[in-house]
């Protein structure tokens, strides 16, 4: 097929869900990943699919542009980048590189091929926001001198590359600012809050709240997120646009811990630990733009999404560890 879709970061949490959906739609997909935070096992069900090709490469290598089939790519979902603070803080220079140099390479491929490109930016572009909730026009409050800067600032520079390629070369670029997204596809050791809390609760270990748990986040279930990304790629209205993709219901982290404890029926204690440096105090998207341009809004609330997530983690853990966790 001449029209291939490239997914960078395909072996990661969102990339593997997106790959599944694209294959389900009958598309030809190239999944590119260096397996730094992703796992090939996430793609196991698709590796034998004749419409799927997995390429284990680093998107920062310029040679990826010359790989076989790259000239057939007509749409690029550029997801490659660690997303969990645990992973990006362990590899800060690689994180800066993938969001800047890696994004430049993918934009260059898009320009050469006349392809569309969707860049997964982040709500971290707003930093520790002084405006609440956050709409796309808000310019953010990001610290350049701290452990989150490698992620936040490189994502922002990635957006700048997108702007330049859209305005200079007319590339059909779409930027999704993604707010905290979750489901069972997150690794147990991913370090992000939902995977930590659910894993801890199912193991009967303490549920680790950082700070006093009054900081808030707005959690989007993965199916809603992927539907949003697909709509952005599909719709011309999203060309040259930055669009928030997230759930507007906001929860304190302590409330999330209590909800996970309740829904798992766990005896785990909730324990309190130091708040990481520069941890944003609040986070909630305005999604009017997504509604207007895409007709998109989330359909799965946290209660429903957590139930699905817990059921899937429970099953995975029982399979992996011989039913030790009940
Ligand atoms: P993830 O860590 O599960 O997946 C990222 C994937 O990118 C991994 O498979 C990793 O191995 C791969 N990767 C990293 N550097 C690479 C490189 N140089 N070359 C090739 N592959 C590379 O993270 P995720 O949650 O799936 O996030 C996907 C994208 O969405 C990221 O760009 C992230 O910044 C963005 N995002 C996610 C969330 C969220 O809540 N999940 C929120 C905001 C933004
Ligand atoms: N958090 C927590 N306990 C954990 C993991 C995270 O209290 O075990 C908090 C973290 O300090 C932050 C929020 O949960 O306030 C969301 O963290 P996550 O790493 O999932 O994403 P972030 O939005 O910070 O990138």
Image (spheres, grey):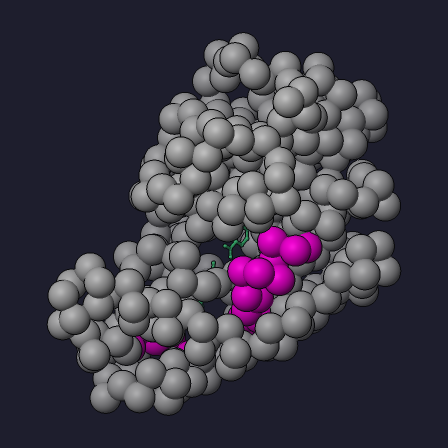
Residue 16 can be seen, yes or no: yes
Looking at the rendering, which quadrant does residue 254 occupy?
A: bottom left
Q: Which residue: 48% across, 29% down?
A: 50
Q: Position of residue 226 (x, y in %)?
A: 60, 53
Q: On screen, 228 above or below 115?
A: below
Left or right, residue 224 beside residue 144: right
Q: Which residue: 28% across, 78% down?
A: 201
Q: On screen, 190 above or below 111?
A: below
Q: Quarter of the image containing the N terminus?
A: top right
Q: Position of residue 302 (x, y in %)?
A: 53, 77
Q: On screen, 312 above or below 147?
A: below
Q: Quarter of the image containing the C terminus?
A: bottom left
Q: Which residue: 37% across, 89% down?
A: 262
Left or right, residue 65 beside residue 277: right
Looking at the rendering, which quadrant does residue 236 occupy?
A: top right
Q: Is residue 212 magenta?
A: yes
Residue closer to the observer: 132 or 115? 115
Q: Position of residue 220 (x, y in %)?
A: 57, 66
What segment carries the magenta color? 207-228
Residue 95 can be seen, yes or no: no
Residue closer to the observer: 316 or 82? 316
Q: Position of residue 188 (x, y in %)?
A: 30, 60
Left or right, residue 311 beside residue 293: left
């Amino acid at each position: 097929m001449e029209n291939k879709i490239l997914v960078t970061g395909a072996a990661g949490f969102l990339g593997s869900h997106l790959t599944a959906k694209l294959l389900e739609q009958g598309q030809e997909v190239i999944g590119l990943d260096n397996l730094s935070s992703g796992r090939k096992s996430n793609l196991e069900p698709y590796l034998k699919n004749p419409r799927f090709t997995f390429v284990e490469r680093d998107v920062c290598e310029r040679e990826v542009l010359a790989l076989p089939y790259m000239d057939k790519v007509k749409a690029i979902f550029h997801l490659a980048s660690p997303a969990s603070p645990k992973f990006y803080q362990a590899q800060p220079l690689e994180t800066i590189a993938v969001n800047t140099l890696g994004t430049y390479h993918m934009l260059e491929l898009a320009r050469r091929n006349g392809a569309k490109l969707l860049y997964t930016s982040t709500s971290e572009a707003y930093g520790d926001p002084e405006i609440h909730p956050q709409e796309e026009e808000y310019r953010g409050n990001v610290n350049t001198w701290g452990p989150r800067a490698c992620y936040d600032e490189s994502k922002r520079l990635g957006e700048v590359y997108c702007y330049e390629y859209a305005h200079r070369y007319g590339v059909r670029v779409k930027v999704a600012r993604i707010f905290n997204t979750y489901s069972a596809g997150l690794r147990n050791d991913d370090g992000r809050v939902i995977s930590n809390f659910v894993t801890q609760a199912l193991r009967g270990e303490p549920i680790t709240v950082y700070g006093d748990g009054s900081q808030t986040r707005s959690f989007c279930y993965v199916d809603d997120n992927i539907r949003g990304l697909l709509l952005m790629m599909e719709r011309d209205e999203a060309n040259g646009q930055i669009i928030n993709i997230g759930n507007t219901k906001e929860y304190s982290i302590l409330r999330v811990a209590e909800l996970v404890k309740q829904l798992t029926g766990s005896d785990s204690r909730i324990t309190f630990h130091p708040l990481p440096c520069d941890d944003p105090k609040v986070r909630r998207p305005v999604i009017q733009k997504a509604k207007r341009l895409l007709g998109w809004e989330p359909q799965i609330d946290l209660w429903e999404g957590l139930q699905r997530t817990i059921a899937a983690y429970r099953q995975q853990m029982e399979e992996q560890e011989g039913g030790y966790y009940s």
